[in-house]
Amino acid sequence: MQLAKSYDPTAVEQKWYRVWRERGWFRPEAVTQPTGDPFVMVIPPPNVTGSLHMGHALNNTLQDVQARYQRMRGRPVLWVPGTDHAGIATQVVVERQVGGAAARRAMGREAFVERVWSWKKESGSTITRQLCRLGVSCDWSRERFTLDEGLSRAVREVFVSLYEGGLIYRGDRLINWCVNCQTALSDLEVEYREQQGTLWHIRYGPLSVATVRPESKLGDTALAVHPDDERYRALVGTSVTFETESGPLTLPVIADEAVDPTFGTGVVKVTPAHDQADWEMGERHGLEVKSVIGTDGRMTAAAGRYAGLDRFECRKQIVEDLRERGLLEREEPYRHRVGVCYRCGTVIEPLVSRQWFVRIAPLAEPALAAVREGRTRFVPAHWANTYYAWMENIRDWCISRQLWWGHRIPAWTCTTCAALVVSRTDPTECPNGHATLEQDPDVLDTWFSSGLWPFSTLGWPDQTDDLRRYYPTTLLVTGFDIIFFWVARMMMMGLRFCGDVPFRDVYIHGLVRDPQGQKMSKSKGNVIDPLAILDTCGADALRIALTAFAAMGRDVKLSPQRIEGYRNFANKLWNATRFVLMHLGGAGPEAARVADRLAGGEWPADATLPDRWIVSRLERTVAAVGEALDAYRFNEAASALYQFAWHELCDWYLEVAKPQLAGAGAERTRGVLLFVFERLLRLLHPFMPFITEELWQVVTAEGWRAGRAGRFAESVMVAPYPQQLAALRDEAAEADMERLIGVVRAVRNLRSEFNVPPGRPVEVRLYAAEAALRARLTDVLPLVATLARAEPLALASEPGPADRAAVESIAGVELIIPLAGLIDDPGAEVRRVEREVEKVEKELGGVEAKLANRQFVERAPEEVIAEVEEKAALLRERRDTLGRSLERLRSLGT
RNA sequence: GGUCGCAUAGCUCAGCUGGUUAGAGCGCCUGCCUCACAUGCAGGAGGCCCGUGGUUCGAGUCCACGUGCGACCACCA
């Protein structure tokens, strides 16, 4: 079988994704003999009309790594995919298509919603198709959409149930209003931006008040001071009358803890209708609520002669009027934070409006307890603190939105008798028998339905098999930016309606940023489009790049260059496998037998040192990867694999294999290669599913040409994940190979330093004092010749008198290269070695001081002392060797 | 104002429970088209591990304080 010279992802990716999906392997039912509990995740549903960005790519890659890993370990894996209707985001997009808000209103509700649905049908599969390109192994047969019939039923059940339980209420309260989007927003949907403003000091009769929003003074219904503020104590409880821009006004003076006596004058004007803090003060003191700004952002009739003015126009006008009347005492530039709409950036107007709210405290309490008791675990753990802090101070959740796209609120008002009906099914008449019901025009906050996602997708409120089998889910993978929006709400809803937490583990990953750590944004122009990367580098490269950078608790800083490194890795794997396949041509059944024996934990009798080394290193990697994945240390797993595959397998073993394949051990070497590659491809599969599948198919087919059937699964994705074969660990082989590598490196190093032409062999002599070591290494000496293009004569017990010019000493092996013919500039070399001697002596000084330390010798564990002693010995040996080299070099120079 | 995170090579970062010579990728320099791979191979330069103090036989790793970044939360008008 011939492979192309370099890896071309496109064809491979399409082919295998289709096969996996058609065989039904993404479904948990595909595992017929489970070896563990089900492993369940729900996807954080992307916006249905969205397009894949790097955040999605990271999030879904990490989930898929776990899904594929757990599946290969024999667990039934259910990963539920789906999309979110994303109320406001989607409505805005479609509204733009039809020509703006006015055009939308002209269309009417029904026609517009119809239009959104057709847009959803048209483009709703874009994001899921893009996810497929990443290779995600979701169970598409269970795909859900938050506006599906089933999920809508869940939403309605939850709403009505909470209403009946007194946890949902309707009320006139101060909410965050976006003048542009024309809807109420929850506290979470308000972002705060630092802004340069002005602080105006305005005269209120005997008092002076500072404000950044003079227009709101039209809605003032009190003045407030701190109860302990001596300056104003006499005024508390009285009323003050004073001149304003629009004539005389009388306001009560109240005392409230919320006032900071050290800020400004210590007097606050209280505008309950347009400020959160003032609203709360108003509640405490029973103040009048006077709304002066309307939902259109213009001043209401209550604003008197300012009525009809835009809020910011009004601000200017009032300031001018105050100045004219001498009521403006002072104005100073002032930096402060302004609340803006998270969607459109328009300054939020707090105003009083009739909205629906969820009473949150009774829901938050069990959700807090569940995390405190460890029933749900945050990874990394410190995110639990963020969660606590928010949940402990959470305010009631405003859930109604003045939009058309979303779950309609299941509440009806009778136009005849004003009765309110909240119902699971659409009612036809009110309790008083009037058939004049009108449904509340508002829809629910998008996050209301997302909060039900872990169980609504499993069929709730019906007690389905899926719900019984797969709830609570095992793992949720998401970004910290939606801990409040989403994770917290799922916790509350899951506990309330299913009696258990929605997930056991929550893995919180970082944000994808550019190389400078900036958030990726279109306006900054630093966005890396995952789709472009998929085209140029392939899904596997993107996946393992993201995985390798996903260190726990860190943001992922990504650049195209860094992904290229992993594209190269994919190509490296491709070519390494190509090399193996080229040598399988002449393989007989013996190679497969060797591989099978190794798979059973048995060494072939004639295994060489490098054979034992690479297998032992592989098993070490198997253990490391498994441990890392179990602990969600994705980057460690990816790095271990990268390091092993490239810098051990390709750099060293494949080079060693070349001579072995040409000699008597060819069949055994083929067997080792088969074993190692087949196993490595399985190990890598969760990270790089496509290329591993393609290569694994070829390797198993070629390697086990006879009798592959039954020996392997149909596909690497349903093959078992490697478990460490402890019998194949060989510490001694690892240590000896280290020596060999050290010797080869030393020779190469010297060749390079002395500019020895590549074609010219170097004469090398090796000495090892220890007899056993000599015996072990003698067999592999020819390798030194091949790998370093050296001519080793033998491995002697000690250098002869003429050879006292050793230049390297590696763990008991001394390396001598006669320098006479190699050195052009002995002076420079002398200086280099002198520097080296200096370094070694400095280090030796430190180690010897340590050994002279009584406390260390008495208290440190024996192994540690032994290690240090061994190190001292090595350093001494090296110092002596270098000394001899120096002597010799100096004699050359003269 | 509160809480949390981060500070290690030119850049971006690993370094888990303290214990051999602090690692990787990219970038840079040198030499190689060596029969799997130039998306490659070999070699090299480059680090008071932010500062101060403490715990310890031993600190990049633990503790305290400081400095500098970053994030989140909060009703300072």
Image (tube, coloured by chain):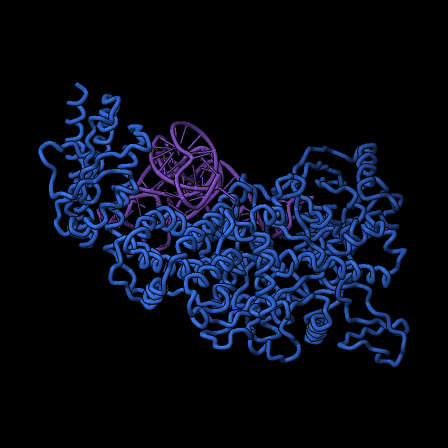
Chain colours: A blue, B purple
Q: Is residue A768 left or right of residue A450?
A: left
Where does residue A322 sit, x and y in percent of width and height? Answer: 81, 36
Q: Is residue A50 left or right of residue A837?
A: right
Q: Nearer the viewer, residue A131 or A668?
A: A668
Identify the image quadrant of residue A406.
Answer: bottom right
Q: Nearer the viewer, residue A464 or A496?
A: A464
- Residue in the picture at 62% in, 71% down: A455
- Residue in the picture at 68% in, 75% down: A165
Where does residue A289 sit, x and y in percent of width and height? Answer: 78, 56
Q: Is residue A781 above or below residue A466?
A: above
Q: Is residue B73 left or right of residue A789?
A: right
Q: Is residue A415 left or right of residue B43?
A: right
Residue reaching furthest to the left: A801
Q: Nearer the viewer, residue A323 or A174?
A: A174
Q: Quadrant of the C terminus of chain A?
A: top left
Identify the image quadrant of residue A799.
Answer: top left
Q: Nearer the viewer, residue A644 or A697?
A: A697
Where does residue A254 sit, x and y in percent of width and height? Answer: 70, 52
Where does residue A430 sit, x and y in percent of width and height? Answer: 85, 78
Is residue A347 something that shows in the picture? yes
Is residue A364 something that shows in the picture? no
